[in-house]
Amino acid sequence: MNEQFWQDLSPKHKAAIQRAIDESIAWCKSFVDWSADMYTDVCKENGMEFYDLPPEEEARWREAARAIWPKLYELTDEAWVEEFLQAVEGKNK
């Protein structure tokens, strides 16, 4: 929805829409987690092996990946990239 439409809504309608947005986001996140776990299990059941990187190797891969960040900044903005990276860090903890 555009800003003007949002601003014209009553506080009651804004609250209802925001609640729907928040619930949708929560559902999507839980679905992504569930499906990732489910597909990981399916892959393992079919013989796929997963390799957990040792911390030093993971750090090396992270540094190599940082080389593409300037290209991401051209496509979006630095704040979005940083927010994405923080989300990934939070997911890995």
Image (spheres, rainbow, N blue to C red):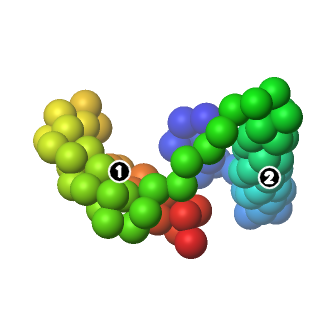
**For the residue carrying disc 1, how many other residues have a C-alpha within 10 Å: few (<14), some (14-19), or many (20+)?**
few
Q: CA distance from mark 2 to mark 1?
A: 22 Å
| Residue type pointed to by label 1 | Trp
Between disc 2 and disc 1, the foreground one is: 2
Q: Position of residue 72 (x, y in %)?
A: 24, 37
Out of 62 and 81, give the one closest to the viewer: 62
Q: How many marks?
A: 2
Q: Judge the density around disc 2: few (<14), some (14-19), many (≥20) Cα neighbours within 10 Å.
A: few
Q: Position of residue 68 (x, y in %)?
A: 20, 38
Q: Is residue 1 left or right of residue 62?
A: right
Quarter of the image with the N terminus is top right
Residue 71 visible (yes or no): yes
In the displayed structure, would residue 74 be above or below residue 34? above
Q: Are marks 2 and 1 in contact (CB under 8 Å)?
A: no
Residue at the spot x=18%, y=34% of the render?
71
Q: Position of residue 24 (x, y in %)?
A: 79, 47
Q: Is residue 47 left or right of residue 71?
A: right
Q: Visible in this render: residue 69?
A: no
Q: Which residue is mark 2?
A: 30
* Secondary structure type for disc 2: helix
Quadrant placement of the C terminus: bottom right
On the image, the x and y values in percent for residue 32 come to 73, 43
**Residue at label 1?**
80
Q: Give the mark nearest the N terminus, 2 or 1.
A: 2
Q: Is residue 77 left or right of residue 55?
A: left
Q: Residue at x 43, y 63 (%)?
A: 54
On screen, 43 above or below 26? Answer: above
Residue type, numbered disc 2: Ser
Residue plotted at (53% across, 41% down):
4
